Every structure is written in C-alpha cells, then in structure tokens.
Image (cartoon, rainbow, N blue to C red):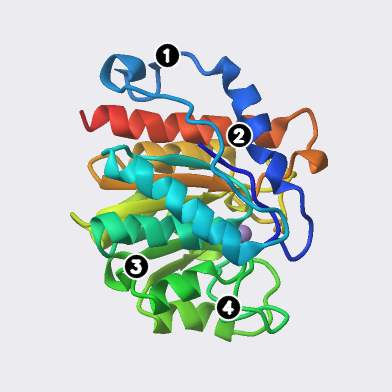
C-alpha cells in the first residue's frame, strides 16, 4: 500500500509521489526471484491495496488515519509493505503494529537514526519517529538495530542517543568495514525470534544509485550490497515493512523508484521463503 504523506520532510519534500512512481517501476518485477530461487507468487497472495488516507499538511491527523487504515489490514492477518512517503509515517505504522502484535523489534536501514526528540521545537517530523516510537513503548530496543548511519551530524549525541535508548547501531563506516555478511549476522542475532518491522529508508543506498531522496548522504551502499544484505535476512519473523523517502522529482531516469521497487521485491522474496 502507498502512504503518500510528505509533510514530515525537513529539507526536500515530494515523497507523496513516491508510491505511484514505485508502483510504475515495479512493472518490471518478474515472478521468479532468481537471487533466492523462489517463485514468489506461487507462495504468496499479494495485492496492491492502494493508498492509505492522509491529509497533506496535517501530520497528527494523518498519523491517526494512517494507523487506522493499517489496523484494518493488520487485523486481517496481512503483512503490509508500505510505500512512503517520508519517514514520519513510521510512527503511525508502529502504533498500529504494536496495537496488534505488541512491542516489535526494529530493523532500520538508514543514513540517519531518526531519534531526535524534536525538530524546530516540533515533535513530529521525519527525523523523530523512532524516538517517539520507543518512548511510546511500541518498539523493543533490545531487539532493534539501526544500520548505515553516516554523514554530517549535529554532534556525537546523534549516535549516542539511539544507543542510550537501548538499540544496537552499526554506523555506515562500521558496516562498510564489516561487510554485509557480518552485518546480516549481527542483525539476525539482535532481533532473534521477535516480531520485526523492517524500515528501509532509501537514503541507506548511496545517492549515486538513489539520488531522489529527502536528505541524501554520500558514502552509502550499492544496490548490490543492499540485495546481498537482504537475501541474508531470511528466517526472521517479519510483521511489516516499508520503503520511505523516495522523492521522484529529484530522480534521474527513475533510478530511485526502480531501486525502491526492487527492495520491495526483495521483501516479497523474504516472505515467500518463509512459507
Ligand atoms: Mn529515515
Ligand atoms: Mn534517512
């Protein structure tokens, strides 16, 4: 489903057009996942549920409508894959997930921790959802991990805060040095058998491959590194996914939407392999 909300953006905006472009790019996704030898649609029943209701410009009302829309789907036993939208949608996603599943573990691939308490003295932006999700008791920090943090930051507190909140953090530099096989082992060990929400901020990928995003950071990961990492993360009890922060107006040859569609395809392969 799409969640075309982008009023949480603090720099570039326009992620409300992410879902329609990711859907368009997904036309090239074929049914057999060669990377993990699975016929995705033989094992999964998949539907494009359309977009959840949002109110441009009104973040708290949009949060209510997003969470309400997701609850209906979650209560039907569906594992949602949400197309953002900016990363502020993670808070209502997690509110709905926690209501149905209880506290969840979090796998977050992102250049940023999104654990600021506020931006511009306001609690809800795309830089704050994980802070509030933990404070609201929606996420189990001991079963949560952030990977890929990099770029210019305000102070060393930016990386200390998510760790003090109880999450594991593998920075971008550390992930490059460890390699994706070791990063995958660390992720799997961290989340264990918890119910897990997987949040993929497209800015995890280097802007050379995915330029159309809200807050691009160089020194990122290749598309192959992302595929290699995701394919090693089978066997986890996923209850939801998202891909966020695609802003098509900044794109070149639809590259970013194409990357995002392929990330969704990798998520589908992970679910198919679990069946
Ligand atoms: Mn983010
Ligand atoms: Mn980010």
Q: Position of residue 223 (x, y in %)?
A: 57, 37
Q: Residues within 10 Å of mark 4 (few under 14, many from 20)?
A: many
Alpha carbon separation for disc pair 2 and 3: 27 Å
Q: Which mark is residue 31?
A: 1
Alpha carbon separation for disc pair 2 and 4: 27 Å
Alpha carbon separation for disc pair 1 and 2: 17 Å
Of labels 2 and 4, the one closer to you: 4
Q: Residues within 10 Å of mark 3 (few under 14, many from 20)?
A: many
Q: Return the residue at label 3.
A: 139
Q: Position of residue 103 (x, y in %)?
A: 28, 65
Q: Return the residue at label 4.
A: 116
First in sequence: mark 2 or mark 4?
A: 4
Q: Return the residue at label 2.
A: 259
Q: Position of residue 71 (x, y in %)?
A: 37, 49
Residue at image point 42% right, 14% down: 31
First in sequence: mark 2 or mark 3?
A: 3
On whether ligand 1 comes within 8 Å of the CB at mark 1, the answer is no
Alpha carbon separation for disc pair 4 and 3: 16 Å
Observer able to see residue 186: no
Of labels 2 and 3, the one closer to you: 3
């Amino acid at each position: 489903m799409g969640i075309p909300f982008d009023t949480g953006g603090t720099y570039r905006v326009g992620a409300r057009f992410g879902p329609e472009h990711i859907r368009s790019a997904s036309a090239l996704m074929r049914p057999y996942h060669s990377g993990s030898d699975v016929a995705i649609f033989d094992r999964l029943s998949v539907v494009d549920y359309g977009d959840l209701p949002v109110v441009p410009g009104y973040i708290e009302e949009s949060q209510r409508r997003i969470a309400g829309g997701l609850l209906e789907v979650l209560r039907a036993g569906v594992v949602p894959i949400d197309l953002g939208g900016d990363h502020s949608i993670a808070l209502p996603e997690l509110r709905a997930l926690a209501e149905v599943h209880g506290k969840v573990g979090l796998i977050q691939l992102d250049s940023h921790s999104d654990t600021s308490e506020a931006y511009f003295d306001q609690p809800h932006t795309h830089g704050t959802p994980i802070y509030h999700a933990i404070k609201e008791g929606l996420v189990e920090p001991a079963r949560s991990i952030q990977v890929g943090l990099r770029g210019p930051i305000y102070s060393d507190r930016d990386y200390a805060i998510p760790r003090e909140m109880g999450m594991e953090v593998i920075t971008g530099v550390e992930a490059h040095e460890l390699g994706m096989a070791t990063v995958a082992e660390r992720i799997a060990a961290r989340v264990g058998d918890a119910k897990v929400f997987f949040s993929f901020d497209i800015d995890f990928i280097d802007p050379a491959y995915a330029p159309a995003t809200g807050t691009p950071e160089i020194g990122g990961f290749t598309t192959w590194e992302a595929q290699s990492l995701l394919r090693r993360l089978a066997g986890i009890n996923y209850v939801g996914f998202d891909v966020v922060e695609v802003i098509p107006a900044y794109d070149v040859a639809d590259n970013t939407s194409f990357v995002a569609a392929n990330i969704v395809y990798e998520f589908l392969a992970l679910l198919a392999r679990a069946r």
